[in-house]
Image: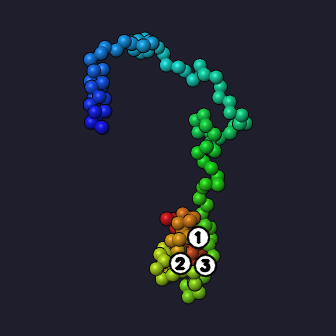
């Protein structure tokens, strides 16, 4: 293994002393050129109808997929705490107390929806995780 490393090191050091010849355009030629303009390119046609929402030249659907977005839980069903059987004592909940009215939201539910839009005594609230 040491022989291979020594051979690679010798080849690399030997190549350092060689003078390289330019290939193609000289750098000064590249600096003197004007950058290409967008008008110089053919129009972009991906077969989508005109007016398709885009981010740059790409259809927005490449970046925003409707089935991947989070849909909030809106006006979730509620029940008295004494009737709840699906929660374990170690389950975490977020609690909201507003004008004497309490509501608990299981973190397990909020982490699925990420946002809960609810009303407590007619007051709109949003709980997020």
Residue at the image position 62 percent from the left and 72 percent from the top? 76
Q: Position of residue 93 (x, y in %)?
A: 49, 75
Specify which label sits upstream in the sequence, 1 or 2: 2
Residue indicated by mark 2: 103
Here the colouring is rainbow
Residue indicated by mark 3: 78
Q: Quadrant of residue 37?
A: top right
Specify which label sits upstream in the sequence, 3 or 1: 3
Q: Position of residue 34 (x, y in %)?
A: 48, 15
Q: Which secondary structure lies at badge 3?
A: loop
Q: CA distance from mark 2 to mark 3?
A: 8 Å
Q: Quadrant of residue 23?
A: top left
Q: CA distance from mark 1 to mark 2?
A: 10 Å
Q: Which secondary structure lies at badge 1?
A: strand
Are dots 2 and 3 in contact, CB under 8 Å? Answer: yes
Residue at the image position 56 percent from the left and 70 percent from the top? 109
Q: Which mark is residue 38?
A: none
Residue at the image position 56 percent from the left and 65 percent from the top? 112
Q: Position of residue 52 (x, y in %)?
A: 68, 39
Q: Which secondary structure lies at badge 2?
A: strand
Q: Which mark is residue 118?
A: 1
> Mark 1, residues whose alpha carbon is within 10 Å: few (<14), some, or many (≥20)?
some
């Amino acid at each position: 293994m040491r022989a291979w490393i020594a051979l690679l090191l010798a080849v690399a050091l030997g190549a350092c002393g060689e003078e390289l010849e330019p290939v193609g355009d000289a750098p000064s030629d590249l600096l003197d050129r004007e950058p290409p303009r967008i008008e110089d390119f053919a129009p972009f046609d991906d077969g989508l109808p005109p007016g398709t929402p885009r981010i740059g030249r790409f259809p927005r659907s490449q970046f925003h997929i409707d089935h991947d977005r989070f849909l909030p839980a809106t006006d979730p069903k509620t029940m008295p705490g004494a009737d709840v059987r699906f929660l374990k004592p170690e389950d975490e909940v977020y609690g909201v107390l507003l004008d004497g009215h309490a509501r608990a939201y299981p973190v397990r539910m909020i982490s699925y929806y990420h946002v809960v839009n609810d009303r407590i005594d007619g007051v709109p609230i949003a709980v997020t995780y």
